[in-house]
Amino acid sequence: MTMPAFERAVSRLFNRFDAQRWRDRAGDARADAARLDDPDARRLMFEIAMTYDRLAIKAEEGRLT
């Protein structure tokens, strides 16, 4: 059975970026958020950081979705 195109794309993405890479990006996003004055922009950057954290966990688990 062939993998759907989306899952193939996600699989390639996880192969390119290991968990540490996602955690590094999360740290960068948090650092950027800390420098922002606008509360809405800061909140969005923290949400982005949390998304990177979830991607790191998925990369560690080898999950695609």
Image (tube, rainbow, N blue to C red):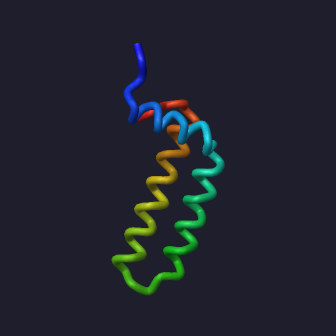
Q: Horizontally, is 54 left or right of 40 in the view?
A: right
Query: Relative to 49, does residue 63 appear above or below in the rendering?
Result: above
- Residue reaching furthest to the bottom: 37
Residue 20: give x, y in percent of width and height.
65, 48
Residue depicted at 55% across the width and 45% down the height: 56
Q: Horizontally, is 3 left or right of 52 in the view?
A: left
Quadrant in the picture for residue 44: bottom left
- Residue reaching furthest to the top: 1
Residue depicted at 50% across the width and 45% down the height: 55
- Residue reaching furthest to the left: 40
Q: Horizontally, is 17 left or right of 6 in the view?
A: right
In this rendering, the count of numbered labels is 0
Residue 14: give x, y in percent of width and height.
55, 39
Query: Relative to 36, does residue 14 appear above or below in the rendering?
Result: above
Query: Relative to 52, does residue 45 appear above or below in the rendering?
Result: below
Q: Quadrant of the N terminus?
A: top left
Residue 25: give x, y in percent of width and height.
58, 59
Q: Horizontally, is 19 left or right of 46 in the view?
A: right
Residue depicted at 39% across the width and 84% down the height: 38
Q: Quadrant of the C terminus?
A: top left
Residue depicted at 61% across the width and 42% down the height: 16
Residue 43: give x, y in percent of width and height.
38, 71
